[in-house]
Amino acid sequence: MSEQPASFQNWLTTFQSFHLPHWQDFPDFEIYMDQLVNLVNQYLEPLMLDPVTPTMINNYVKKQVMFKPNKKRYRREHLAAVVTLTLLKTAFPLELIKEGFNTELTNLSAEAAYEHFVTTFTDKVQALSVTQPQPLPSADFTPALVLQETAATTIIYQLTSKALMELTSANKGVSAHDKSTK
């Protein structure tokens, strides 16, 4: 296998140092829409995703992917939902995410479901290697656990693919000769 370009290795190192916020990192008081949007965008900024907007959040509530705020105030459950939704949307349609949320929240509290997702996502990012074989679910097979593992893996590989495509297109105009003379 050929050596990876330094720019991709830099991206991979930066990506592997990224950590999702934990439940206890969220404010322990109600916040308004603009605060929710700002916090989520701040948490996810290192991933270079499209920013979350109030329209998106209103759409999630309207489509019942997440529950309504109480008197226009949002809680930790909303922050966890929007962080998770923003990541899942990179690879899955909203209806599938809604089904997954409904399944998870019938079995777990919002905090437990979110913390498990954070742990799974972090473990998958830390284990990410360009040389690893196909990601397979762990031996602890339960549908809910495998669903989270494969969802986290899908997001990670989608983000990795996007970074590689962007780096490749940025280097397209540079010939092999130009690269070897630098």
Image (tube, rainbow, N blue to C red):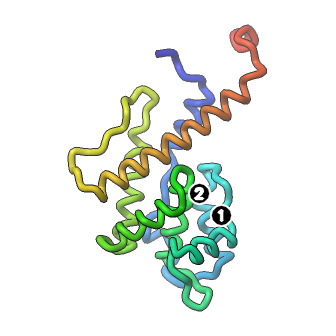
- Residue 61 on image: x %, y %: 57, 76
Residue at image coords 58%, 33%? 10
The mark closer to the camera, 2 or 1, is 1
- Residue 34 on image: x %, y %: 68, 76
- Residue 51 on image: x %, y %: 67, 59
Viewer-proximal residue among 16 and 65: 65
Residue 182 can be seen in this image: no
**For residue 20, side relative to residue 56 (left or right):** left
Residue at image coords 37%, 55%? 148
**For residue 126, side relative to residue 94 (left or right):** left
Residue at image coords 30%, 55%? 145
For badge 1, the amino acid type reads: Val
Which type of secondary structure does the marked residue at label 1 adopt?
loop
**To which quarter of the image does residue 106 belong?**
bottom left
Residue density around tag 1, few if under 14, some if 14–19, many if 20 or more, within 10 Å: some
Mark 2 near mark 1, Cβ–Cβ under 8 Å? yes
Compared with 14, 167 (above or below) is: above
Viewer-proximal residue among 150 and 18: 150
Query: Image quadrant for the C terminus?
Result: top right
Which type of secondary structure does the marked residue at label 2 adopt?
helix
Q: Which residue is mark 1?
A: 52
Residue lying at the far bottom of the rendered structure: 71
Report the Cα–Cα distance between label 2 and label 1. 9 Å
- Residue 62 on image: x %, y %: 59, 77
Compared with 31, 144 (above or below) is: above
Residue density around tag 2, few if under 14, some if 14–19, many if 20 or more, within 10 Å: many
Q: Which mark is residue 44?
A: 2
